[in-house]
Amino acid sequence: MKVEQCTIIVGAQWGDEGKGKIADYCAKEADYAVRFHAGNNAGHTLVAGKEIYKLHLVPSGILNPRCVCVIGAGTVIDPRVLIEEIDKLGERGIHSRLKISQRAHVIFPYHIALDSALSEHQGSLAAGSTKRGIAPVYADKAYRHGIRMIDLLEPDIFKEKLKKAYQFNEALFKSLSGKSLEESLESIFQNYTYYGKRLSKYVCDTEYELSQAYREGKRILFEGAQGMCLDLDHGLYPYNTSSNNVAGYAEVGSGLAMNHKSTRIGVMKAYVSRVGESPFPTELKGPLGQELRERGHEYGTTTGRARRVGWLDLVQVRQSVRLSGLNALAITKLDILGGLNKIKICVGYRAGSKSIQEMPASLSLMRNAKPVYLSLPGWRPYKEHEYKRMTEQGYDSMPREMKIYTEFIEKNLKCPLSIISLGPDRELTIIR
């Protein structure tokens, strides 16, 4: 796989594809690792040897001791969560080389309270929010009630903005729930002034620093969160998130304009998982679904909620390839499918007499979509040492059935499948 100066990693499904592992693997050669959107609603689990790290805001590049980690302007930050994450990493001997965009917006307690109230109000159209305040903070950004990291460092400006934002969100919360906010304006002001002081040494003009690093030829890794199907504009609306998850948003959310070609890697799981509500054409609800859930440890890093699981859906990934301009794919959890006699892949949908090859915007079509499956032969389960031998010997040492599966995906999507993950550890990875 040819790697350009800038590499963008994005999810090609519903999120939870294993982007953290792929980002951690790619970050070994990176000088900078950048989060460019979303907040602590996203979670990445990294496995390095016997150590397991669960990150929500800090980029996965933190495990590379020479990599500068950037939280960009397109992200939204709960400072309490970020401080906890920094402190926990410090306790494990990982001292932060972190830089936070002064333009990143801040999540407040009223955003979190409002998130729950909104989910109840939306009923059957609720997206299955993580209740971390993500939609309300992005809404405040659009309403121009938002408060940025730089504002926490300027007490007079902070208090002026907080009064307006608090009044607006309290009125909205009352109209939805009939209740008052639990935390007072003054309490929030005191707590967040303290958070600002704790984080002040990290807050800077990250956009300028990234542009300088780019000019100097530094390698920059952009780490996406969630997945294409959750994209605010191109995902399955309204069952999506509140930010853009496609690769093109890396430039917007980081503030770095890339003048040259970038490596754009879409991460896909060998099957599909989904947290939250929405139509899910390939969902497995019986014993096989439960078996895959347990084998793959399909419980949310952020919420702990059980994920819905199903067969691989190439309609989703095909759209990801097109929308993000992907020039490489990474497949994870291929090992989890070991032991299945037949493995199904969804190659399209049918809704009545209508054949569907691209994700429709129509919610009624998605609710009525039935998967069109192709069955491929499965492979026996392998032990970890056998997978390790495959990674040492390369792609040709993989079993024939596994190669049939991966090569069918590659041919159908017309995009090279360049990274194959055969387990959670970073070393259980094949690069083609």
Image (cartoon, grey):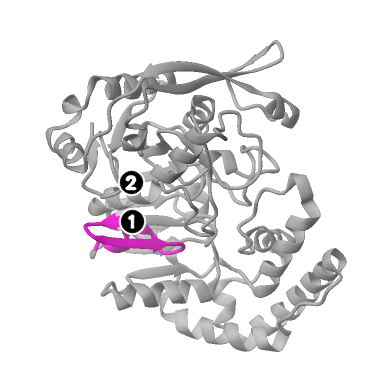
Residue shown at 28% from the left, 74% from the top: 92
Q: Dot 1: within a 10 Å radius of its alpha carbon, few (fewer than 14), some, or many (20 or more) residues?
A: many
**Picture coordinates of residue 191 (x, y %)?**
59, 86
Q: Amino acid at mark 2?
A: Ile
What's the CA distance linking mark 1 and mark 2?
9 Å
74 left or right of 356 in image: left
Instruction: Tell me the number on the disc at residue 22.
Output: 2
Residue at 70 percent of width and 59 percent of height: 139
Q: Is residue 352 magenta?
A: no
For label 1, the residue is 46
* Amino acid type, residue under disc 1 in the picture: Leu
Residue at 44%, 72% in the rendered image: 204
Magenta segment? 46-64
Q: Quadrant of the C terminus?
A: top left
Report crowding for label 2: few under 14, some 14 to 19, many 20 or more residues within 10 A (C-alpha): many
Which structural element holds mark 1?
strand
The answer to whether one can see residue 11 in this image is no
